[in-house]
Image (cartoon, rainbow, N blue to C red):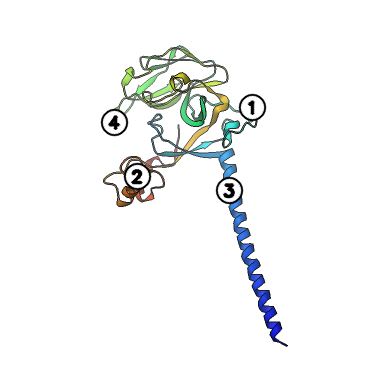
Amino acid sequence: MTEPARLDRKGTGMKQKAKAKEGGKGDTLKVIVQALLIALVVRTFLFQPFNIPSGSMIPTLEIGDYLFVSKYAYGYSDHSFPFSPPLFSGRIFAAPPKRGDVVVFKLPSDTEKDYIKRVIGMPGDRIQMREGRLYINGELVPREPIAKAHTVVSWGHETDVPTYQEILPGAVKHTIIQIQGDNGFKSNTQVFEVPPGHYFMMGDNRDNSTDSRFSPDEQGVGFVPFENLVGRAELIFFSVGKGEGEPTWFSAWFSVGKGEQPAWAFWEWPWTVRLDRMLKSVK
């Protein structure tokens, strides 16, 4: 008469173990879902990571920099959300950018593309380049020559280039380079009158930046509407550059040789991570 009792206890124990396993899987799934929701909220409303694929903002931002952009800085528009759903018009909790801010925005002619430039012209401003010098509302923007930056200019050639500290209205200082001096492309332009609700953007690498000096018809940026702003660049949290020496067998296997390395190429980090750029604020 005891055998059935032993079988019952065994069956009950197996059921309890099965329930415990199901409960453990359920808890794990909850944690994953919660983590994804938190990440989505942070990315949508607080900070979004971006990487720099081009040299238009050298020396402020280098190719291979990874940075955080504050989404709340200018309020929220459709472009604050993934895939830019048409939820509402304009911006909510709006706060206009300041002259000199480094801003991520949606390209007006193709809102699937993200650009990053510096705010140079505010609504109502008149912007012009004359012989390589910036004029705002007819006034020459002062600049001071500083130590030359070392960068790639063409065909992989590296050299020192003319570098200046430019002082925008409001005493906003930032660094620019002019690879071709004062005679580069778009060093002389028409007067651009910034429409209401729009901004004029320029890259700090003045001779290698497709920005508001170029109209959409020229495959450029043109004036940027306020609602196209995604956020303000705040902090470089990671940076990888050019590998030194011969590529390792691992990088050769994955066709990752010399040049800017992807962030996931951790085996190259001892040679490619730029520690001096990490945790550097964007100004």
Q: Amino acid at mark 1?
A: Ser
Q: Earlier in the sequence, mark 4 or mark 2?
A: 4
When the figure is inspected, residue 41 is found, relative to residue 123, above or below; the finding is below
Confirm whether residue 157 shows in the render: yes
Disc 1 is placed on an element classified as loop
Q: Which residue is mark 2?
A: 272
Disc 4 is placed on an element classified as loop
**CA gap, disc 4 to disc 3?**
43 Å
When the figure is inspected, residue 126 is found, relative to residue 154, above or below; the finding is above
Disc 2 is placed on an element classified as helix
Q: Amino acid at mark 4?
A: Trp
Of residue 235 and residue 249, the one placed in the foreground of this image is: 249
Q: Residues within 10 Å of mark 3 (few under 14, many from 20)?
A: few
Q: Which residue is mark 3?
A: 36
> What number is the disc on residue 155?
4
Q: Position of residue 149 (x, y in %)?
A: 32, 30
Q: Answer with the quarter of the image where residue 1 lies.
A: bottom right
Q: Earlier in the sequence, mark 4 or mark 3?
A: 3
Q: Amino acid at mark 2?
A: Thr
Q: Earlier in the sequence, mark 3 or mark 1?
A: 3
Say whether marks 4 and 2 touch (CB < 8 Å).
no
Of residue 90 and residue 82, the one placed in the foreground of this image is: 82
> What number is the disc on residue 89?
1
Number of the front mark, 4 or 2: 4
